[in-house]
Structure formats: C-alpha cells, structure tokens
C-alpha cells in the first residue's frame, strides 16, 4: 500500500495490510500534516495500528495546543506556516526523548539531524504504509534507549516503481 499526497486509502485496505501493533497500542501521537489526504491516510494507518491520534493542520495550531507534549510526533516538512529549515531546528531542540517521524519529499535536508538524533526517522514521500509503521516503532524504541534491530538502517525510503 503506497501512501502519497494524492488520494485516500480505503479503510479495508489499511486494515488488511497493517495489523494492530502492540508497540503502538494507545500511544498518543501528534500528527501535524497540512495536506488533508495525506493526514487522513497517515491517521488511518496509525489508528488501525492502535495509536491514539490528535491531528493538526498547521504547525501553529500544534504549537499553540496545550497538549503539544505527546508520546510521539509525526510531522510533514511541507507545512505552509513552517519553513523546512525552521522545522529542522525545532526538531533538534526537542531533544532525544521524543520519538519523531518526519515525512518529506526532501530527505537529504533532514539527514544530518537523523544521523545525530537516533529518535528521528525520516520518510520519503511516497512511502509504503508498513515502512511508515516500522519507522514509528523504530523511533519509539530509539527514544526509549532500546537499540534493538531496526526495520531500515537508513530510515529513508526510496519510492518503489
């Protein structure tokens, strides 16, 4: 199941491909994505996996929220109210305790941050749903200090043809 900015994923397709995940069960995730279709698809993947998702359309609404401290942050780097460079700097300031998954069409811009922060995973759009969920798991494990086997050592996804 390939997730991109265009279109939505049918619920039955998501549930058939992504089973509930004990690592994500009732995990509070802040989802900050401006594109409605992409946000909906990611929300469905996370919800089907058992996570509790709070959605934000802009960085401003997320930052103004009283509940910005979530267990995990999933954020699109193409938010209309946040330049990528500023986002990259803010992610560094969050430190190593928060698992972060950055969804981007520009993975090279986040590579230096990913290398120095084990809790950050960078996903290149479009991406496979199963790869996304594995990246969330890896970010959670890394932030918790568990450096067990990871699904993808580079955590960058090259689109499939």
Image (cartoon, grey):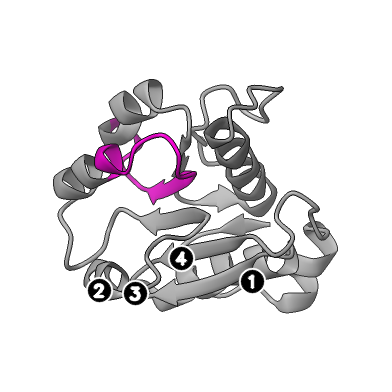
* Disc nearest the viewer among 4 and 3: 3
Whether residue 117 is in magenta: the answer is no
**Residue marked by disc 4:** 31
Identify which residue is drawn at 36% across, 57% down. Answer: 76
* Disc nearest the viewer among 2 and 1: 2
* Span highlighted in magenta in the image: 91-108
Query: Residue 140: x, y in percent?
Result: 59, 41
Asked if residue 32 lies left or right of residue 144, the reply is left
**Residue marked by disc 3:** 66
Query: Residue 81: x, y in percent?
Result: 16, 67
* Disc nearest the viewer among 4 and 1: 4
Mark 2 and mark 1 lie on one chain; the one further toward the N terminus is: 1
Mark 4 and mark 2 lie on one chain; the one further toward the N terminus is: 4
Disc 4 element = strand
Query: Residue 98: x, y in percent?
Result: 45, 44
Query: Residue 160: x, y in percent?
Result: 58, 41
Asked if residue 117 lies left or right of residue 121, the reply is left
- Measured in 3D between alpha carbons, the distance from the residue under mark 4 to the one under mark 1, in whole angstroms, is 11 Å
Few, some or many residues within 10 Å of mark 4 (<14, 14–19, 20+): many
Is residue 65 depicted above or below 129 in this figure? Answer: below
The quadrant where residue 112 appears? top left
Q: Is residue 161 visible?
A: no
Is residue 47 depicted above or below 115 in this figure? Answer: below
The residue nearer to you, when weighing 129 against 100, is 100
The quadrant where residue 113 appears? top left
**Residue marked by disc 2:** 64
Disc 1 element = helix
- Measured in 3D between alpha carbons, the distance from the residue under mark 3 to the one under mark 1, in whole angstroms, is 24 Å
**Residue marked by disc 1:** 44
Few, some or many residues within 10 Å of mark 3 (<14, 14–19, 20+): few
């Amino acid at each position: 199941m390939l997730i991109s900015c265009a279109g939505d994923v049918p619920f039955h397709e998501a549930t058939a491909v992504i089973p509930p995940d004990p690592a994500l069960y009732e995990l509070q995730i802040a989802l900050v994505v401006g594109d409605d279709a992409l946000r909906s698809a990611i929300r469905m993947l996370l919800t089907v996996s058992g996570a509790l998702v709070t959605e934000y359309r802009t960085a401003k609404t997320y930052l103004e929220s009283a509940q910005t401290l979530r267990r995990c942050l999933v954020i699109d780097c193409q938010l209309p109210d946040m330049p990528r460079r500023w986002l990259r700097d803010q992610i560094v300031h969050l430190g190593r305790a928060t698992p972060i998954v950055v969804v981007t069409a520009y993975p090279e811009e986040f590579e230096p941050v990913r290398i120095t922060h084990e809790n950050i995973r960078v996903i290149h759009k479009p991406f496979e749903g199963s790869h996304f969920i594995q990246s969330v798991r890896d970010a959670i494990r890394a932030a918790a200090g568990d450096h067990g086997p990871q699904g993808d050592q580079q955590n960058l996804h090259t689109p499939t043809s």
